Amino acid sequence: METRLPANEMYAVRQCFERKHPDERFFALAETLLWRNEVVAGILDAAIARGILPEDELNDSQLTLETVALLDLEVPNGGLLQFFWNRPAWADRVPASLRLIGLSGLASTFERSTAELISRVGTYSEFRKRDSLQAYSECASGFSFDEFDSAYHEQGEQVYARTIEFVSQHLGDFVA
């Protein structure tokens, strides 16, 4: 199934690149290329409902943009713990996505920040199966993600700039 936007949508994509601020460009691209693309949005909605990553349905560039966009929706709002809680299926994809957009240092910080959680709890999905406020509270008091949260906030503009550059360089993966 074709998941890229049709070529006649290129004008809408160009308008995203013309937004004044990097954060506006970033979210306009995610919205246009993923969330308003009916095919991709349907795949993402179904995957989220099933708690899986749609690796066989979206291309690597689409998965990278979605991963970084989800990370940016969660981390500034509630930190890395909130990302794990709300998007556990996407957590394993984060380091590769950050490296693909050129933020290897941030990817390494993510891996360091999550190593203890993985060793003590197991997979992110296993942690999330304890779907309760008490489980969330236990994790919040038992693990510190301050290193990643601080690094992410410090590099926020770079996350936007590098993702925009990535999309620009891989536009053929988003638009037919």
Image (cartoon, helix red, strand yellow):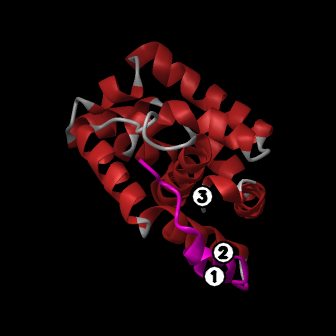
Q: Is residue 85 visible?
A: yes
Residue under the point 44% across and 34% down: 56
Pick the residue in front: 164 or 38: 38
Q: Is residue 153 visible?
A: no
- Residue underneath mark 2: 25
Q: Secondary structure at mark 1?
A: helix
Q: Based on the picture, tell me whether residue 4 belongs to the magenta stretch.
A: yes
Mark 3 residue type: Phe
Please identify the quadrant where the C terminus is shown: bottom right
Residue under the point 72% across and 73% down: 22
Farthest residue, direction top: 119
Residue 21 is drawn in which quadrant?
bottom right
Rendered view: 171 above or below 84: below
Does label 1 or label 2 sit earlier along the sequence? 1
Mark 2 residue type: Arg
- Residue underneath mark 1: 11
Pick the residue in front: 157 or 65: 65
Q: Based on the picture, tell me whether residue 87 belongs to the magenta stretch.
A: no
Q: Position of residue 92 (x, y in %)?
A: 52, 30
- Residue underneath mark 3: 174
Q: Position of residue 8 (x, y in %)?
A: 57, 76
Pick the residue in front: 29 or 68: 29
Residue range of the region highlighted in magenta in the rendering: 1-20
Q: Position of residue 48 (x, y in %)?
A: 31, 46
Residue under the point 55% across and 43% down: 59
Pick the residue in front: 99 or 62: 62
Crowding at mark 2 (Cα within 10 Å: few <14, some 14-19, many 20+): many
